[in-house]
Each structure stands twice: as C-alpha cells, then as structure tokens.
Amino acid sequence: MDNQTAKDQLDTVIRKARVHFYKPIQIAEILHRDRIEKDIDLGDLETYRTPSRKWRDEISLRFIGRISTSSARYQDDLFNANATPPTVLSQLAKINRDSNGAVEAYIYTALRNRLSQMSSGLSIVLQSDNNSFTLRNFIDSFTRDPGLSRSVDKIFEIVVYALFSTLLEVLDVKIGVRIDNINNTVLSEFSDFTEKVLGLSEDTPELYQAAKVYRVGVTNAADRGLDMWANFGVAIQIKHISLTPTTIKDISNAISADRIIIVCKESEKDVLVSVLKQFGSASRIQSVITEDELEEWYEKALRGQSSELIGSKILQKLANEIKVEFPSTTSEFDNFFKERGYDHLSSVDF
C-alpha cells in the first residue's frame, strides 16, 4: 500500500469522526505505542485490538473528559476494510516512525482544530444576551461547518436540555409518589423495601420532589441510545440528523420506556409518525417536538413576557453544558505536544 492511500483512509476516519474523536485518537495511540514501546505487531490485530481502547481512553479522558461507551462491535468498525485495517495501520506506522510521530501529531492537530471550532459555539453563547441570541443562527453555525455537522446532534441535545431544565425549574414543577393504602399488610411486611427504594413509610406515605431532566451524555448515535430522561417517567430521544425507517425502528426498539418524547426536524415529523405506526410503537410516543417549536419556545424564553426570569438562565445552561461536553483548552494541547515532542516537528502533514 502506498502512503497516499493510507493517508486518504485516515482522512476519511477523521472526516467522519464526531467531535469526541474516539476513533482517530485510538489510531494515534496505536501508532504511538508502535513507535515508542515497539511491543505490538500491527499485522496482528489481536495484539492491539482490545488494549488500544485503554490507550485511547486515557487520552480522551484528558481532552474530552469522558470515554467511549459504545459497543465493542461499533468500536471495532475502526479496523474494517473501509477504515483503517491492519494493512493501513502498518503503512501509517512506517510513515510515523520515519517522521518521529508526524502522523500522531497530524491526528491530534485535527482534534485540536475540531475542539477549537466547538469553542466558537461557546463564544456565540457567551457573547449573546436575550436580545441577540437566536436558536436558528446558533444551530446553523454548526451545520454550515463540515467538521462539525456530524456532531450537531450533540449540540441539539444541549439546546433541548437547556430549555427543558430551565422551564421545569422556573415553573417549579413537582412530582410525587404516594402509597394509597397505608393499612395494607404488604406495606407492613415490606416496610424496609418501601423505605429504602421509595423513601416512603406508614408515617411518610407520600413524597414530592422537583421535576428534572437529565442528559445521559454517554451514548453514541450509532448505538441508538437514550439521550435524556426525566424523573417524571419519560424518555427523550433527540434526532437532528435525517431519519430513515431503520433509524426510527431503532429508536422504538432501543428505549423501553412507556412514554417517549422525540425531538426532530419539522421535515422528519410525518415520516416518523407514519413508520412508528407501522412498527406498532405509536402508542408509546407521548409527543413529537419539532425544531420549529423549539425556536418558538426559545423566542418566548428570550424575548417574551417572562424573558427576564428565563432568558439568562437558559443561556447560562447552554454555556455550562458546552463547557462540560468540550472541556479542553489550547494550553492543554500545547503541554501535550511538548510531552510527546510534536512541537519539534517541522510539519505535522505527511
């Protein structure tokens, strides 16, 4: 295999990677291990298939603050013929050794650039106020950038969370559980269960708490996972990408909740409802919220009658969630490049 073909396949993995960059990081760490430790055989996938996940996780924790929780099968797609199989990795490793780590530096430079693009989204929020922030422009700033368009679902998720959590807080919504029959013999016999699991007893037969939504935060779109859940019994699936019958079936099958809220683009709503009816899952869908409705709610929150109470809270939550999702700074990358010696390379291209 020639150098250009190997580079082209690496570039494809980088281009397709979502913002957390798990697969490119794993490639970089395989190449780093080969260059420094020289204890793996790149022609033998089993010498690094599983260990390389740990090497990747150490780096992703440092820069992203989280690790991949995708299925092993999905993670192993990295080694498919259309990605970076052993033949491609072997060629990249040769280039990497001959250049003292240029391929590693190339990958991490791409990661740094990707995260700096995400930080521009944070800047938009921090520099905005109730009068200047518009949801459409904010989302479009990500969809216009080819490097960020595959990660727009994550931003869309943050947008939904900021709105939902703020409104529940401002509305002071409470949810509760109650034992109707406190004289029940089952209650007497299982009083320890009700106290430990429900927080209820004969003396405290009902309990109320603030209604909240939570971001799962560890799912990957390819894993069809749950995006958000609420302590009042609904699961929330957020899809900004185009939906297909297969995607919709996956949504239905992947979530066991009896009540599901789906957030999607206006253009996807009809096909979503139609296909869910075919799968017999429509009864589980509590509601479908469109991006247009989100825009309307954001407009009310930022510039409506209650904007002074709601607007700044939403913008603060947006900023906080972006910081949590993408925590790395330029100084962290500078230190890392010095540690690895990448800063001495005359070029990180190859």
Image (cartoon, rainbow, N blue to C red):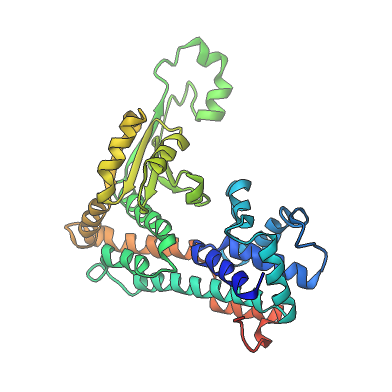
Location of residue 148 (image quadrant): bottom left
Residue 254 vertical position relative to residue 43 in the rendered view, above or below: above
Which residue shows up at 27% across the image and 53% down it?
A: 291
Residue 66 vertical position relative to residue 186 in the rendered view, above or below: below
In the rendered image, residue 123, in percent from the top left (x then y), is placed at 39, 74
The quadrant the C terminus occupies is bottom right
Viewer-proximal residue among 222 and 226 = 222
The quadrant the N terminus occupies is bottom right
In the rendered image, residue 254, in percent from the top left (x then y), is placed at 47, 37
Which residue shows up at 47% across the image and 11% down it?
A: 184
Location of residue 162 (image quadrant): bottom left
Which residue shows up at 41% across the image and 74% down it?
A: 120
**Would you say residue 231 is visible in this rendering?**
no
279 displayed left or right of 56: left
Residue 106 vertical position relative to residue 80 in the rendered view, above or below: below
Which residue shows up at 41% across the image and 36% down it?
A: 252
96 displayed left or right of 191: right
183 displayed left or right of 284: right
Viewer-proximal residue among 296 and 6 = 6
**Would you say residue 292 is visible in this rendering?**
yes
